[in-house]
Image: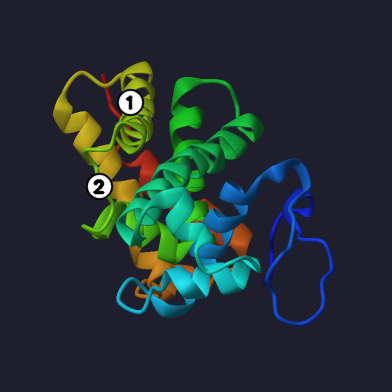
Amino acid sequence: MTNLPPTLKPDPVPPGGEGRSYHHGDLRAALLAAAEEELAARGVEGFSLRQVAKRAGVSHAAPAHHFGDAAGLFTALAAEGFRQFLAAQAAREARAAPDPASQLVAAGLGYVDFAIARPALFRLLWQSERPDFGNAELGQAARAAFQHLVDQVMAAGGRSTADEAAAWAMAHGLADLLASGRLESVGSLSPEARDAMVAGLIRRVLPTG
């Protein structure tokens, strides 16, 4: 098991992996972290609840107890993914100038940050049919992500769905191409130069009023 937040790391136990306890009882969050690791390592097709349990160091029945089946776990992971997606944008926005245009560009940079750092989760959100988007929690998280885009485009002078689509297409296209390694001319740049390039491209589709 790797990269779990400090409060979610299991207490040491003898080899065998079962019977571990989690600080604050946050087993659900630990299983989601392990599920993301499993998704990154094996993809959707190779995904296994048993392997998720092994990564988290808990009983093989624990994921099913919390999420029902793989679809339930994918759905919960996608809901958390959308919340983390918004958090990545918020982190960039907090460091940017407060004017609407700068905030929209910052959100686009956060979009790219999330995709590059967590490509498997990014693909689960946007390219997979495994999560149940009819689920209330996931639906709410996905709508919040989209509404954030709409609000920012409107604040920056947008007047139509075409403005929303242009901003979304640019940010998402850049994020997808960079996460997949297909935009080598930009991905090979230093982080600072890449950010400048991405920001410049996003500014090209800012609403003109």
Question: Whole-percent x and y of residue 163?
Answer: 21, 30
Instruction: Check disc 2 and give the amino acid type.
Output: Asp
Residue visible at 34% across and 51% down? 72
**Image location (x, y in percent) of residue 154:** 31, 19
Disc 2 from disc 1: Cα separation = 20 Å
The quarter in which the C terminus is drawn is top left
What residue type is disc 1 on? Gln
**In the visual, does 168 lie left or right of 152?**
left
Q: Position of residue 144 (x, y in %)?
A: 37, 28
Identify the residue position indicated by label 2 in the image. 132
Circle nearer the viewer, 2 or 1: 2
- Front residue (pair 197, 96): 96
* Residues under numbered marks 2 and 1 in contact, where contact means CB atoms less than 8 Å apart: no
Residue 147 got which mark?
A: 1
Any part of residue 101 in sight: yes
Q: Considering the numbered disc 2 on the image, is that residue within a helix, a strand or a loop? A: loop
Task: Mark 2 or mark 1: name the one nearer the start of the chain.
Answer: 2
Q: Nearer the viewer, residue 87 or 35?
A: 35
Which image quarter: residue 120?
A: bottom left
Q: Residue 157: image x %, image y %?
A: 31, 18
Q: Nearer the viewer, residue 46 or 40?
A: 46
Left or right: 134 in relation to 88: left
Q: Residue at x 36, y 55 (%)?
A: 74
Residue at screen point 41% across, 73% down: 48
